[in-house]
Amino acid sequence: MNVRMPDRIDRGVDEIEPPRPAAIKFLHASGSRPLEGYTIKRGVGRGGFGEVYFATSDAGKEVALKLIRRNLEVELRGVTHCLNLKHPNLVALYDIRTDDMGDQWVVMEYVCGESLEQVIERHPDGVPIDEAMWWMRGICAGVGYLHDHGIVHRDLKPGNIFLDEGTVKIGDYGLSKFISCSRRSGQTESVGTVHYMAPEIANGRYGREIDTYALGVMLYEMLTGSVPFEGESVGEVLMKHLTAEPSLEAVPQPFRDIVARALAKDPEVRFANVGELLELLPGGTTQAAYQGPASASVQTTGNGRNGSSLFSPAAVIRPKAWEAQFGRNRNSEDSGEIPEPIAKMLRQSIQNLTDGWNAWTSNPLAKSLVAIAAVVAAVFSVWGWIPVLMTGFFLYCLYYPAWVWFIRPNMKSPANPLFSERPTVAVATPVAVAAAPPPTQREQAAERKRRRYGWRDQALREVAIKPIRDKATELLGSMLIAAGMCVALSGLGAMLVAGDRVTFNTSFPIFLWLATVSTVGCWTVLATNKVTEGRVEDQVPTRGLQLGSGALVGLIAWAVGSMLWIGLPVSRDLAIQPGDSLAGEFLGWRDSYFASHYSSGSVAPPLAITVGYFALLFVALRWWRLAEYTRRVRVSIWSIAWMGFAAWLLQFGWWFPQPSGLAVAAIIAASTQLASPWMPPSRRRELAARAV
Ligand code: ATP
Ligand code: MG
């Protein structure tokens, strides 16, 4: 049986807190004055950080006092930034004070109405849609304001959202940042609430997208009466946030798409900002039209105020009208059309290539040389291009009607990450830094380290949690580009490899061999990288994969060579005698049949030699690094040169015709880099800035 878990967890502690006692014993009795200037009237409740009291100031102002538990430390850095925030949808924070016992108190506005948690409890099958929208608009307005001021709430949940005289109020903003667990216990800070916790929190680095995720969970909960992920332990719930897709059947349209996007595992797929989500909500950003949930009876908390007259059912916005509005919004956003994935993939890949080209180097000479080489390569490989393009076009013509008539009608979700354009992610300003004391030397060193490497950790985490569909789309796009690159570069390669015997008849089969082998090689590198990317560099399985794929490439190289009836050119300047290699010595290649062709300048290497060569070539070098999203430069000439050189060097251990071997390696190295997505420096800076 699934149970609702206690909300708060301390990161690193995977245990269930005991249920709260029905009658809470508070530390301070009514009438006591633990904090100078305030008299406690009664205890209100207890949460993850400590106790909350209703109190009055000496001047008679009603306030809520939150006592931070003694084993917690209040980090005051930047808290003044929060103290000065003013927004109708935020519980006003008046002060942070320390009492005579050294305990910290948060002095804040006292909110008299019920919390959203209580509202949801009253509606086990879901809050009426109009009421839910009213809450959502208030919450989004408050959270949007926080984000605009550089604060990530980090603890958004129904228990921290209240109703006060007809206005939605968000409490506890910024507090989870400022309150951290005792350093004595060795625990790290206490972050968020397990049912509302975005997957990236598990990785420790996150930005304001975690609030968008929590908003998605709350919307889901309001509409269905239960949270999207429940489980029997904190760990189980967390694991579901990390890996499981929420079941959205219970969420009525048009909210399903909004919830799906807000709950995307990849923070980048979520709404770029809360305003975007707010606009998509039926009724948009209009607040004035509705003054409160018609069915809600405002629960007073004992201070004599009653808010029940605040709600008027008059201005309820009807769901049908919302649907119409939602439809318009959506259509205006993406023209109501799901983009055709292969065309989209091609567009993205070309965009990627253009971005990489623009960011590559500012040296015009280098760019011109590469551009000329590319044109020459394209011209010389035109006989390879034509069949490739024609086959592609023919297959696309067959596929397109199937897409229009059968596939697209079954894929209606614009929130599907495969079809939604990636929102541009605004740089999330780090959590409040105003009035911060100057950083210590240690902090400065940590900051420098974070600036240097933080972006990579962050990027790897993002890559690791990227949805499989996104990865598959990216991989297909890269494979298409890689094939094009390999064909183009093989044109150039074939001329160079054929050397002084270059004629169409001699170089065309070599071109076909190079293009096929390098394309397959590239594809295996790209696929291997997609499987392993984002993981901590555990080289054993990766090398295992490389070994297998190298053997496969070798098999294909042999098969293509046999089909084309070609011997690969052997240049006496570049290739040693087969028998002079280490393997040749031991395996007696000196007197073999194929070695006797060495002097003729063309050798067809047998199956075992070809498979062995490519298997060794792939297992010995870190090919996957060329495809990594976080590689330092998009196209490194050094990597291409090194891969080519290493492939040449390998002949001393395991013979293979050269320069064919080195040409394949260099083409794979160049094409893999050109075809793989790469994180440009601007994005790195953005990620470094986003590390909270
Ligand atoms: P968390 O520590 O994650 O916020 P919580 O919200 O359950 O958990 P507290 O914030 O400590 O715990 O709140 C304890 C109780 O005090 C809750 O029942 C809440 O409704 C009430 N409360 C908190 N802040 C106020 C406030 N400003 N005015 C009135 N009641 C409040
Ligand atoms: Mg709270």
Image (cartoon, rainbow, N blue to C red):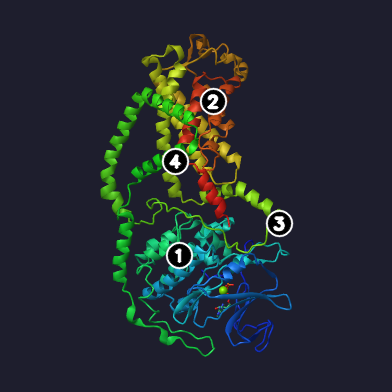
Find numbered disc 4 in the image and state the secondary structure of the residue it sits on: helix
Q: Quadrant of the C terminus?
A: bottom right
- Looking at the rendered structure, which numbered label has been put on residue 216? 1
- Residue under the point 27% across and 48% down: 404
Three-letter code for the amino acid on which mark 3 is drawn: Thr
Name the quadrant containing residue 388: top left
- Observer-nearest residue: 250 or 573? 573
Q: Is residue 507 left or right of residue 321?
A: right
The residue identified by callout 2 is 644
Residue 539 numbered tag: none
Q: Nearer the viewer, mark 4 or mark 2?
A: 4
Labels 2, 3: front one? 3
Q: Secondary structure at mark 1?
A: helix
- Amino acid identity at mark 1: Gly
| Mark before the other along the chain sequence, 2 or 3 | 3
Q: Amino acid at mark 2?
A: Gly
Position of 648 with respect to 105 (left or right) is: left
Categorize mark 4 by other alpha carbons within 10 Å: few (<14), some (14-19), many (20+).
some
Work out whether mark 1 precedes mark 2 in sequence or the reverse, and give the earlier one.
1
Q: Does label 1 or label 4 sit earlier along the sequence?
A: 1
Marks 1 and 2 sit apart, C-alpha to C-alpha, by 50 Å
Up/down of 391 relative to 207, above or below = above
Characterize the local packing of mark 1: few (<14), some (14-19) or many (20 or more) Cα atoms within 10 angstroms: many
Rendered location of residue 27, percent (x, y): 68, 82
Residue at which label 4 appears:
355
Residue 397 on image: x %, y %: 27, 39
Categorize mark 3 by other alpha carbons within 10 Å: few (<14), some (14-19), many (20+). Answer: few
> Pointer 2 and pointer 3: residues touching (CB < 8 Å)?
no
Q: CA distance from mark 4 to mark 2?
A: 26 Å
The CA span between labels 1 and 4 is 33 Å
Q: SS at mark 2?
A: helix
**Is the residue indicated by label 4 positioned so its CB lies within 8 Å of ligand 1?**
no
